[in-house]
Amino acid sequence: MKMSREAKANLVSAAITDDRTEIRLVRDRVYSIATFITVGSFGITSFMLAKEGARISMTFETKLLMTSIDGALLVMLWALCCRMLIDIRLAQLWLEVREKLLDALVSNERVAANVKIYNIAPTEQPGIKHNNMYWVLFAATVAISIKLAALWIVKF
């Protein structure tokens, strides 16, 4: 069954809406993960400090344990978020391909019979790069690093 150009344009428009929603949701997940890991790091540190007691200086083993916990949290932060940033880049590329397809359908240009939107080269870069997401990860990393440095420098 042949579809009209208007029906095809409606389908592509719905896919574009879904792509934009997906990009927004993944960006929100990156913000949430960075927030939860940063707050979790500070929470674990406050728990460990309360456990050590206010009058007793922290032992080397406790500082080492907190360093390894924060290191593991930072590795988890970057591993999860870098994977999500790849998903954002690919979703943005698919969105741009669908937008070009919709423009071709609306302007009555000839559209290829088999449009392969999933045939995107790994080296292609989208028009919108979402580089601001790295600032969120850097801010979380700096906050945890400053807290960790303060634990090693300050005497309790």
Image (spheres, rainbow, N blue to C red):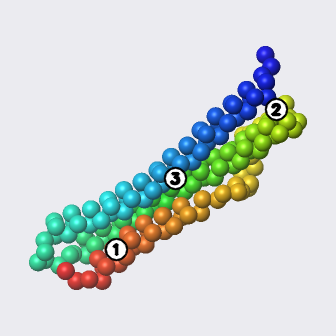
Q: Which quarter of the figure has residue 100?
A: top right
Q: Label 1: how many residues lie within 10 Å, few (<14), some (14-19) or many (20+)?
A: some
Q: Label 2: how many residues lie within 10 Å, few (<14), some (14-19) or many (20+)?
A: few
Camera-near label (2 vs 1) is 2
In the figure, 89 relative to 59: above or below?
Answer: above
The answer to which of marks 2 and 1 sits earlier in the sequence is 2
x then y, percent, for residue 68:
35, 66
Q: Are marks 1 and 3 in contact (CB under 8 Å)?
A: no
Q: Nearer the viewer, residue 96 or 48?
A: 96
x then y, percent, for residue 30:
48, 54
Q: Specify the farthest residue to the left.
A: 55
Q: Specify the farthest residue to the top.
A: 1
Q: Which quarter of the figure has residue 62?
A: bottom left
| Residue 90 visible in the current orientation | no
The answer to which of marks 3 and 2 sits earlier in the sequence is 3
Camera-near label (1 vs 3) is 3
In the figure, 110 relative to 49: above or below?
Answer: above
Q: Please indicate whether residue 19 sits to the left or right of residue 100 in the image.
A: left
Classify mark 3: helix, strand or loop. helix
**Which quarter of the image is occupied by the C terminus?**
bottom left
The answer to which of marks 1 and 3 sits earlier in the sequence is 3
